[in-house]
Image (spheres, rainbow, N blue to C red):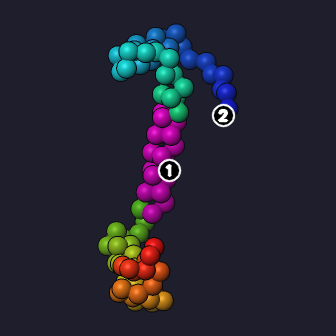
Amino acid sequence: MTRWSVQVSDETDKALRAFLAQQDGESDNLSAFVERAVRTVIRRETIKHMQDRNGQYDQQEILDTVYDAVKWTRGHRPWSGNHGPFAPGSGA
């Protein structure tokens, strides 16, 4: 686990502590809140970056390509149907 030292305005501190106290009755969940907030921002920014990067491609063409790849993969399995290590009765 890593420790961070950050500075925020008094207004932000008070607002966050009041928010946390309303959520679960405790204001000591600051670490969990910060972790969730950071993960949320990273996820949103990653999605935005991917959408911007892939915006030049036709959505239907992407879906068709994925469909074709899945169809090809399913047709080229080393086993199919009720055969293979995860088939019913195989003990897996």
Magenta-colored span:
36-54
86 to 53, vertically: above or below: below
Element type at marker 2?
A: loop
Answer few, some or many: residues within 10 Å of disc 2's Cα (few below 14, many 20 plus, some between 14 and 19). few
Residue 80 visible: yes
Query: Mark 2 or mark 1: which is in front?
Result: 2
Q: Position of residue 76 (x, y in %)?
A: 45, 89
Query: Which residue lies at the image location 43% right of the left edge and 15% below the top edge?
Result: 26
Picture residue at 41% right of the left edge, 19% below the top: 20
How far across and down, in percent of the image, does residue 10 sit? Answer: 52, 10
Q: Quadrant of the N terminus?
A: top right
Residue 71 within the segment the image draws in magenta: no
Mark carried by residue 86: none
**Amino acid found under the numbered disc labelled 2:** Met
Question: What predominant SS class does the magenta segment belong to?
Answer: helix
| Proximity of marks 2 and 1: CB atoms separated by less than 8 Å | no
Q: Which residue is mark 2?
A: 1
Q: Residue at x 41, y 87 (%)?
A: 83
Residue 34, compared with residue 41, is above or below; it is above
Q: How far across and how far down the image is residue 7, in percent?
A: 61, 18
* The C terminus sits in image quarter: bottom left
Mark 1: which secondary structure? helix
Determine the residue positioned at 49% across, 22% down.
29
Under mark 1, the amino acid is Thr
Q: Is residue 50 magenta?
A: yes
Which residue was labeled with disc 1?
Answer: 46
- Location of residue 58 in the rendering, given as x and y in whole percent from the top left corner: 36, 70
Up-down: is 39 above or below 68? Answer: above
> Is any atom of residue 69 visible in this view?
no
